[in-house]
Amino acid sequence: MSNETKSPGKILPILLGIVVLVVVSIWLLAKLATSGFDVNAEVMSKEAIAARLKPVGESVASDAPPGMRTGEQVYKAICISCHATGLAGSPKFGDAAAWAPRVAQGWDTLTKHALQGLNAMPAKGGAADLSDDEVKRAVAYMGNAGGGKFTEPPVGGAAAGAAADPAIVGKKVYESVCVACHASGAAGAPKFGDKAAWAPRLKPGLDEVVKIATKGLNAMPPKGGFSGSDADFRAAVEYLTNAAK
């Protein structure tokens, strides 16, 4: 047997290999122990979480306030999921042959089926947050694309130029726009229902309050940031002021 001593040049690579093997083993064990705990910032963002928690059937919002979406907006947000392809026996959008027997049933029957549900279609297409008029507008929009001649219920619940109902339209505008500040009194806004805060503002009369709100004042932008009609905005102002009388 040789008593020759191994040279340091041969031992060093072996030692380095052992060190690398130990480091890799520790890294793999740590990775295994923490698997499932990696957090993706994009996946865990507030927006992403909110989207995952959104109730099934809740309509995809457009820029229009709730209750004021057009038939086209409702179709593109809700109805398109089935009617674009004819899923589950639904009449395909624009298919005159499929829509003809349904159009022949008349407006009342068509809207009744859409509101209450029929066969595989749930009530309001599964979007319980839609107003009855929004559903009817969608029916008119789809029916007309299939050969019908229906008239969509006017947005705002009234004909163009007519006054909108504060208790219905005004309330919806408030809940979709004005609530951001008037619910808490943010940025000096008078709180909803606070008679003491509203009293000095109501003295000039409703027309003056509407005029000021339309132009904007202090931190409030014109019309409070509302992009709808003047009639609908006035209804919201009336809804706010009525609650403070």
Image (spheres, rainbow, N blue to C red):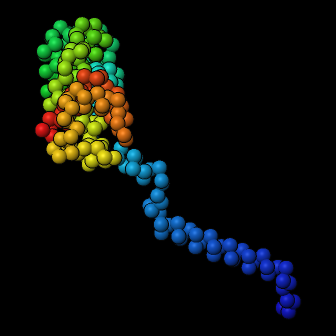
User: Which quadrant would the N terminus be assigned to in this image?
Assistant: bottom right
Asked if residue 87 lies left or right of residue 43, the reply is left
Residue name at image x 63 percent, y 73 percent: 23
What is the number of callouts on the image?
Answer: 0
Q: In front here: 55 or 198?
A: 198
Corner quadrant of residue 58: top left
User: Looking at the image, can residue 45 be seen?
Assistant: yes
Question: x, y (%) of residue 55?
Answer: 27, 42
Residue name at image x 58 percent, y 69 percent: 27
Q: In front here: 95 or 175?
A: 175
Corner quadrant of residue 90: top left
115 versus 29 height, above or below = above
User: Which quadrant would the C terminus be assigned to in this image?
Assistant: top left
Asked if residue 172 lies left or right of residue 20, the reply is left
Question: x, y (%) of residue 236?
Answer: 23, 31
Residue name at image x 28 percent, y 16 percent: 141
Question: x, y (%) of residue 151?
Answer: 22, 11
Corner quadrant of residue 138: top left
User: Looking at the image, can residue 128 be seen?
Assistant: no
Residue name at image x 28 percent, y 44 percent: 189
Question: x, y (%) of residue 20?
Answer: 68, 72
